[in-house]
Structures are given as structure tokens and as C-alpha cells.
Amino acid sequence: MTVIVDVLVVRPCMAMDISLIIDPLRMVNQLAGKPIVAIRTSSTDGKPIELTNGTVFVPTCRLSDVRDARIVVIACSRQSTSAERRHVRTWLRTNSGGDTRFYAATFAPFLLAEAGLLAGHKATVHWEVMPAFCELHPDVATLEQVCMVDRNITTCAGHCAIADMMVLLVQTELGERLGVALAEELMIPISRLRDAPQRPLRVSLDGRRIQSDVPWGY
């Protein structure tokens, strides 16, 4: 049986983020020796998206055509427009019931929170935007971890943590054995997946976090 994974790309988006979502899924088919994962990609309007590195990503459909999603991975950057986000929020509220499971990368946890899907539950975001996220969404228990799994929603800190999230997706949806095989292929320690801190080395001698003054966003 082929498992369909829906990948929603919200413009604008980093090419690296999309690769870290789609390429591990393709690797799963190689590891399994047969096509057990089908990837369906969408944008809010079905039109191509110019990525931040100048390349163009062409989705297979528009978001409104995705009505039977069971596994949804969302990639979104900080520069997403209000119109894009409003469209996604509406879709999320309409399709958040039932057995659908969501995996949110980079700025996508903000979209889930805005849609009310994270209220009263645990989540994570990139450490640089965590103060803003906590201020905007005090009803979400936000922890600085690489990945966070709560109910049917997995959030991650973005960038390379997306690969960790995809291993968790494979473990959850396709089985532990295949998830371990993917982690080994990607050279990701299994111990890093859930409770690992985002910045294990960025701690000062007195135990306080060292904050960065570099603005986040791409």
C-alpha cells in the first residue's frame, strides 16, 4: 500500500527546506526497494513558487484540491504574506479533524498556532523567534527542542531539524525499522530526535543562554 504525503509549500520558501522534506521521502522508497511513499505537493494557488535561491518549485496541485490528506508537511518562511497565511489558516481549520497528522517546518508552527491547532499543547519553533512566538501564543507550551511531538502534530525548529522531523514522520507512519534506516542514511543520531535541545553548546559558564542579535528570517 502506498502512503500519500502531502507537502504544502507556502511562498516564499527556502529551497533547502523543501529538499529536506522531499528528498528523505524519496530515499525511503529507495531503502524500501519499492514505491511505498507518494509525494503530492501543493501551493495555495497551484502556481509555481520562486524559492529564495532563485530556483522555481512547481507543485502538483493547488491547496483547495487537497481534501483527503492524512499526512501533511508544511514548509513556510517568515516572509509569508498575510494573504498566503490566511488561505492556509482557512484550510487548516477545515481539514484539522479526523486522522490527519501535521508536520510543521520552520515558520509553519506559527500558522498552526494562528489556526488554533496548538492551543493548550506543546510545540517548538526556532530559538530566535521563540520569544515572539511565546508572546503571540501564550496558550502554547513552547519548548526549545529540535522536534516536539504532541498528539497528531509534530513541530520542528526548522533548517537541519527538518531532517530529524522527517525521520520521526517515517518512524510514525511507516515503522521504526524504516525510520532507523533513514536516520542511518542521513547520519542523524536517533537520540537527537525528540528531547534534544536546539543549542546544546550555546550556554554561558553561569548557565544562562547566550542570545544572538542576528535578525531571523530569510
Image (cartoon, grey):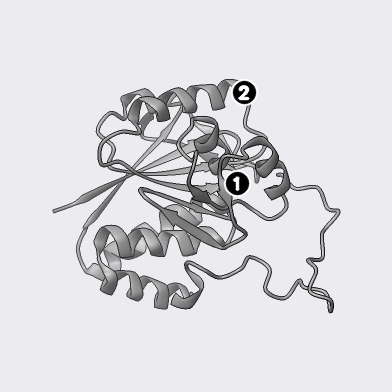
Q: Which residue is mark 2?
A: 82
Q: Residues within 10 Å of mark 1 (few under 14, many from 20)?
A: many
Amino acid at pointer 2: Ser
Q: Indicate the position of residue 119 as horizontal and vertical percent values.
A: 50, 38
Q: Residue at x 25, y 61 (%)?
A: 174
**Residue 201's spot in the image, x, y percent?**
72, 76
- Residue name at image x 33 percent, y 62 percent: 170
Q: Circle 2 — which element?
A: helix
Q: Is residue 22 above or below residue 114?
A: below
What residue is drawn where x is 62% and y is 23%?
82
Q: Quadrant of residue 67?
A: top left
- The residue labelled by disc 1 is 14
Compared to residue 141, the image places residue 200 above or below, namely: below
Residue type pointed to by label 1: Met
Mark whose residue sits in front, 1 or 2:
2
Q: In terms of depth relative to the viewer, which is nearer, 39 or 104? A: 104
Residue 10 located left or right of residue 208: left
- Distance from disc 1 to disc 2, alpha carbons, whole Å, reads 18 Å
